[in-house]
Amino acid sequence: MSASALPTSPPAAQGVDASGVQAFLDALEAAPEIEPHSLMIMRHGRLVASGWWAPYTAERPHLLYSLSKSFTGTAAALAEAEGLLDFDAPVISYFPEFEADITDPRSRAMLVRHVASMASGHRRDTVDEAFGRGVAEPVRQFLLLPPDGDPGTVFAYNQPATYTLAAIVQRVTGQPLTRYLRSRLLDPLGIGEVAWLRDRTGRELGFSGLHATTDAVARLGQLYLSDGLWAGERLLPRGWAARASRPRTQTAGAMGATDRQDWDQGYGYQFWTSRHGYRGDGAFGQFCLVLPEYDVVIAATAATERMQEYLNLVWKHLLPAFGPEPLTGREAADAELRERLGRLALPTAPGRPTPAEGDGEWAATHFTPSAGTGPVRSAGLVPDTDGWTLTLTGAADRPDQPDRLDLRLAEDGWTVAEESVPTAVSGGWTGPGTLAVEVVFLETPHRLALTCSLADRTLTAHWRTQPLHGGRFTSLRAPRGSV
C-alpha cells in the first residue's frame, strides 16, 4: 500500500516561524559531526516543513535502529487490548518450555511491564551474552542471566528486554511484528512498505532493525500526539500514549555520560521522556519527537554520534519557532523555506570522474589494505564505455556468501545505484595516483570512506559511523520481502 499524502500547510498558518526552521537547518549543516538525512515537522496535525538531503529521498526506507522499539511497544499495546498479552504477567509464563531451566527467583519474578520499561533488574546491556555464539534461543539465554536487582527497581538500556517483549508479541499473535501491525496500524496510518531484520530464530528483532520512511515515523508520532486517534478512528487504546510516555524508572546517570540530559529524564514503555515532550530514538540520530505542549511532531533521520547535540539544536532553534497563533505577512519567508527544503543535499566529495592524462595505469589494478583488515579486503578498478567500476570485496567475505559490491564512478556529484545494495557514490581522482570516494548506503545511516593509492596498490577504508548489525556490504539494505 502506498501512503496517502499527509495534510500540509504553510508554516505561518500553523503559528510556525519559518526563520526558526531556517536557523535550525543552518545549525544542522554547520555542525561538523552531524550529517542530516531527513526532517519532517508537523504542527496541529499539518505537515509544515519536510526535506531530504540528497542523495537520500522521501520514498526510501531508512534503518531506524532503536526507534524500532517504539513500534514494538505499540504492537504490545495492541496485543494487550486484544486480550493476548498481560503487562502484569510473568515473562516466563509465555515460555513454559523454559520453566524448568529458569530457577533464579528474580528472573521468575520478571513481568512483561518490566521488560517493556527496561527494568528487568539487570544493570547492564546483556545483548552480547544473550546473542552470543552458540546461543540458539536468545530469550532463554536472557532469562538465564540472573538480574542484579529486583525487577522494576533499576534501569538499564538492555536490548534483550525489548527483544523478549517482541518475542512475546510474536508468540501470542502467531505473526511477525510487521504482519501483525499491517492491518491494525500501518495500513490505517497510510504507511507503505516496511521491513524488519530477523535473527537466527526467524523472529523480527523488535529492539532494532526496522526499515521505514521518515513519513512513517511522522505518522506514528502524530498518532501518539492524538492519543491513538487517526482520521477519527481509534487505533490505539485510549490513554496508551500517556502510559507509554510516563517514566517508569529513574534513568539519570544510567547511560554513563554527563552530557546526555535528554536521557536522564526517565523511560516509559519503549519511549524516552525528554526535557520537552517524549520521543523514540535510534542510534546515529533517528528521532520521533512528540511535543504535546507545542502540538508538534518532529521526525528526523541522520548519521551522528552526537545525538544530544542534535536535540540541543532542536530545543534552541525550533521550540521558539512554535508560536501560539497563526502568523501574518510571512508568505515570502514560507516560500523561501519551501524552496530551501526542496534543494537540500549533502556535500559531495572532491575528485574527477576519470584519472588525469598520464596518471598511470588504473585499469584492472588490484588494491589491498595498507594496514590491518578494516571493512574492505580488496578493491579493483575496470573501465567501461562511460566511466569506471570500482569493485569492493568485504572483509567479512566467506566463500559460501561472497560480500562483493560494484560501484559506478561515472559523473560529478552523487552517482546512485539501485542494484543489490542501494548506494550513492561521490568523489574520484583527487591527485596524482590517488582515488578517494565516499559510499553512502542509502537505506542506512552509514557511509564508507575509501582511498586507493596507485603508487603502492594499497587502500585505506573506514566507516564514518560503524554499522551495528554487522558490516557486510550486502546486508546494508532493507530486507526484501517487506510488508
Image (tube, helix red, strand yellow):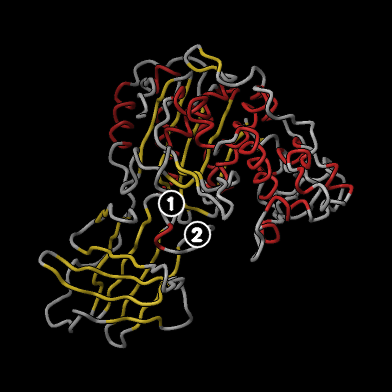
- Residue at image position (70%, 30%) is 85
Query: Looking at the image, do the residues carrying marks 2 and 1 touch, with CB atoms under 8 Å apart?
Result: yes
Name the residue rendered at 64%, 17% in the picture.
Answer: 238
Q: Would you name the residue on which mark 2 appears?
A: 467
Other residues around mark 1 within 10 Å, as few (<14) / some (14–19) / many (≥20): many
Tell me which amino acid carries mark 1.
Thr
State whether residue 314 is above or below residue 294. below
**Residue 217: x %, y % from top left:** 48, 34
Identify the image quadrant of the N terminus: top left
Identify the residue under disc 1: 444
Label 2 and label 1: CA atoms lie apart by 9 Å
User: Looking at the rendering, in which quadrant would you find the C terminus?
Assistant: top left
Of marks 2 and 1, which one's residue comes earlier in the chain? 1
Q: Nearer the viewer, residue 58 or 349?
A: 58
The reply, left or right, for residue 121 in relation to residue 39 is: right
Secondary element type, mark 1: loop
Can residue 274 be seen here? The reply is no
User: Of all residues shown, which one is farthest toward the right?
Assistant: 105
Q: Is residue 349 left or right of residue 197?
A: left
Residue 13 seen by the camera: yes
Q: Secondary structure at mark 2?
A: loop
Location of residue 206 by image quarter: top right
Where does the image place residue 353, in percent across and percent down from the top left?
A: 19, 66
| Quadrant of res 46 | top left
Under mark 2, the amino acid is: Pro
